[in-house]
Image (cartoon, rainbow, N blue to C red):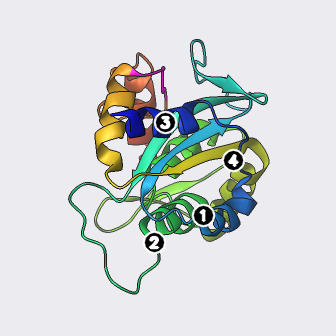
Amino acid sequence: MEADQIAAKQVLEPAKLIRPADILVHIEEYAITHGLYGWWFDDSLPEVPSGGCREFDGKHLLYIGIAPPKDRPIRPGSATPVKRRLWRNHLRGSVRSSTLRLSLAALLKDQLCFDFYRDARGRVRMAKDHEEQLTTWIEEHAGISVVHHDAPWQLEEALVRNGPPLPLNLSMSGHPFKPTLSALRKALGRD
């Protein structure tokens, strides 16, 4: 239990926020393979209610995630779960591979003039140049807190359900912004 409290504190009350461009170096330096991470954003998402959210270094903690998920096996020889999730999905992925990217894209649709479409299976997509634009926006407006934890799903559920407000978390969240964010995401590529 004490280890969980220490890990939670490192995500909720970090000594510093890691710039997205520096996250791979940080993960390697601290040997983080499994873990819990927090995404902190500046005031560039005015529609997102940040009242009551943790604040640090001019940014608010709006989302918490984990790697790996509880039910996903780790493949030998592949990138570590935290590296894969943060770098390949959230920072360099697509709106299809990251719920965080999809939420951000929905919130920034008008501001950044994003266009969306649905593929043959009905999944939301954006053009590659719009994905790159979203990546640039994230690099300019976000910070990350991350900590190693062997069973991060145990901690995630407690923090999303009983921790500080996390308006960009949809799963397990009872945040009042959830219906608004869900509707924005659902409308993408349908006009």
Distance from the alpha carbon under mark 4 to that under mark 3: 41 Å
Amino acid carrying mark 3 in the image:
Ile
Residue placed under numbered mark 2 in the picture: 80
- Please tell me whether residue 121 is drawn above or below residue 107 in the rendered image: below
Amino acid carrying mark 4 in the image:
Cys
The number of callouts visible is 4
Task: Please state which of the two labelled residues, at mark 3 or mark 2, is closer to the viewer.
Answer: 3
Distance from the alpha carbon under mark 3 to that under mark 2: 22 Å
Q: Main secondary structure of the magenta part?
A: loop
Query: Magenta residues?
Result: 163-167
Q: Residue at 24% across / 70% down in the picture?
A: 73
Amino acid carrying mark 2 in the image:
Thr
Q: Residues within 10 Å of mark 3 (few under 14, many from 20)?
A: few
Secondary structure state at the residue bearing disc 1? helix
Residue placed under numbered mark 4 in the picture: 113
Question: Which quadrant of the figure has residue 173?
Answer: top left
Secondary structure state at the residue bearing disc 4? loop
Q: Check contact, mark 2 vs mark 4: CB within 8 A.
A: no
Q: Earlier in the sequence, mark 3 or mark 2?
A: 3
